[in-house]
Amino acid sequence: MTTTTAAPAPATDPLRAALSSGQRPARPGPLSTALAFAWRAVLRIKHVPDQLADVTVFPLMMLFMFTYLFGGALAGSVREYLQSVLPGLLVMTVIMSTQSTAVALNGDIGKGVFDRFRSLPIWQPAPLVGALLADLTRYAMAATVIVSVGVLLGFRPDAGLPGLLAGMGLVLLFAWCLSWVWTSLALLARTPESVMFLAILVTFPMSFVSNIFVDPATLPGWLESFVAVNPVSQLVTAVRGLMHGQSASTEIGWVFLTCAVLVAVFGPVTMRLYRRER
């Protein structure tokens, strides 16, 4: 009689045994995932400090150039002109810095980074939301730089520190909502250069054809009408009102409405473009 001997059971892989012995970690939630990607974007600023040029050098250049070139001619003195123009320059510099969001995003897409992100078992909007949250850091830096130097030059907000912080907060909110427009553009454009060109094509007319530098009443009628409905003009008036304690409730309401419309329209558009197969 022949006896069949059973083959010995294969030895358990030590690595597999170690991995299967513990509980699987919980899947990260939307907030923690978005914050992780926000930290990734902040680290990029740390390792590539050249990105800070548009939130440090550019605000100071705009502040000194416009204040000292036009202050005496338009308001009689630099100090007096500064009370009016600094809130406008704050709006302008922060809005201009939102373009970098789209350029960096488009560069990552071109490198295939976001293809990898889409394959991960995470909350899918997290890479975009995290990048936009990190950009709030850049906007806050730009606002802090221009306001701090403005105070040294003689800017004095009549509403004190609370009004100053409220005005800065309103600018940051508008900039974050506007960033959704450039994010949609970044998902459509082929190159970072085209993203930058299209963003400048929009932001420059909105900034310069506004009430930042001059009183709209001095403009031709047709141009004054455009300035009156320009969202940037509404934002500048609202920020001036908050910083100097003036009544600007109507303009503040329009700013909040504009922010809501931007997010409601371009948020879903951005998500749809992001999920689309490239």
Image: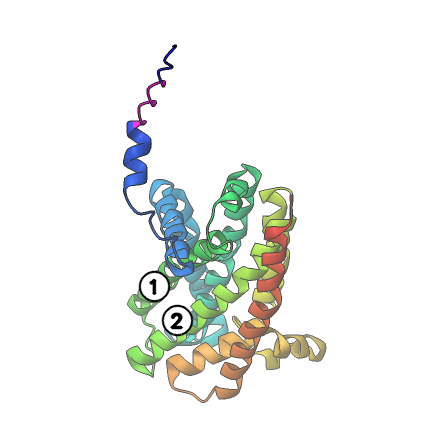
Amino acid found under the numbered disc labelled 2: Met
Secondary structure predominantly adopted by residues drawn in magenta: loop
**Span shown in magenta:** 6-13
- Measured along the vertical axis of the image, is residue 61 above or below residue 233? above
Q: Position of residue 49 (x, y in %)?
A: 36, 43
Would you name the residue on which mark 1 appears?
A: 144
Q: Is residue 43 visible?
A: yes
Mark 1 Cα-neighbour bin, 10 Å: few <14, some 14–19, many ≥20:
some
**Is residue 257 rendered to the left or right of residue 43?**
right
Viewer-closest of 211 and 120 = 120
Q: Residue at x 37, y 57 (%)?
A: 32
- Measured along the vertical axis of the image, is residue 228 above or below residue 89? below
Quarter holding the N terminus is top left
Mark 2 Cα-neighbour bin, 10 Å: few <14, some 14–19, many ≥20:
many
Contact between marks 2 and 1 (CB within 8 A): the answer is yes
Would you name the residue on which mark 2 appears?
A: 168
Q: Earlier in the sequence, mark 2 or mark 1?
A: 1
Q: Position of residue 232 (x, y in %)?
A: 55, 71
Amino acid found under the numbered disc labelled 1: Thr
Q: Secondary structure at mark 2?
A: helix
Q: Residue at x 44, y 83 (%)?
A: 241
Separation of marks 2 and 1 at Cα, in angstroms: 8 Å
Residue 242 included in the magenta stretch of the image: no
Q: Residue reaching furthest bottom?
A: 247
Viewer-closest of 85 and 24 = 24
Q: Position of residue 134 (x, y in %)?
A: 40, 55
Q: Secondary structure at mark 1?
A: helix
